[in-house]
Amino acid sequence: TDYNQLGFNLRSNIFQGGPLESRSLMKDSYTPDITQRVIRDPKNWHGRRTDELGKWHQKNALNLNLQKALQDKYG
């Protein structure tokens, strides 16, 4: 059955996992100085800017945390 074949393959170590050293297309495409001098802007993440909905969710999370802290402190 398929279950026995899978168990045999697992015991035989046919599925050895991924490579020990990973390679990325960016590291292969560019020289090391390009990746070191890049400026990372947290508001512009992979070309996607923080929009109004994201800012609202951030403020809402802070508001919920504040409400919870006030309720814990004052009951």
Image (cartoon, grey):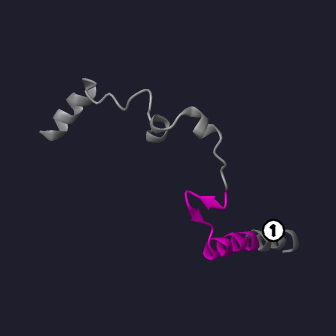
Q: Residue at x 16, y 33 (%)?
A: 5
Up the image or down, 64 lies above or below 21; here it is: below
Image location (x, y in percent) of residue 60: 70, 74
Pick out the residue farthest to the right. 74
Q: Residue at x 62, y 60 (%)?
A: 44
Residue 34 figure quarter = top right
User: Who is closer to the viewer here, 19 or 50?
Assistant: 50
Image location (x, y in percent) of residue 10: 27, 30
User: Residue flagged by tag 1: what amino acid is it?
Assistant: Ala
Image quadrant where one finds the C terminus: bottom right
Q: Is residue 38 left or right of residue 70?
A: left
Query: Under tag 1, what secondary structure?
Result: helix
Residue 21 figure quarter = top left
Query: Which span of residues is magenta-colored?
Result: 42-64
33 in the magenta segment: no
Residue 55 figure quarter = bottom right
Image location (x, y in percent) of residue 52: 64, 76
Pick out the residue farthest to the left. 1
Q: Residue at x 53, y 34 (%)?
A: 31
Q: Is residue 16 left or right of residue 46?
A: left
Image quadrant where one finds the N terminus: top left
For disc 1, the neighbor class at 10 Å (few under 14, some 14 to 19, many from 20) is: few
Residue holding disc 1: 69
54 in the magenta segment: yes
Image location (x, y in percent) of residue 30: 50, 38
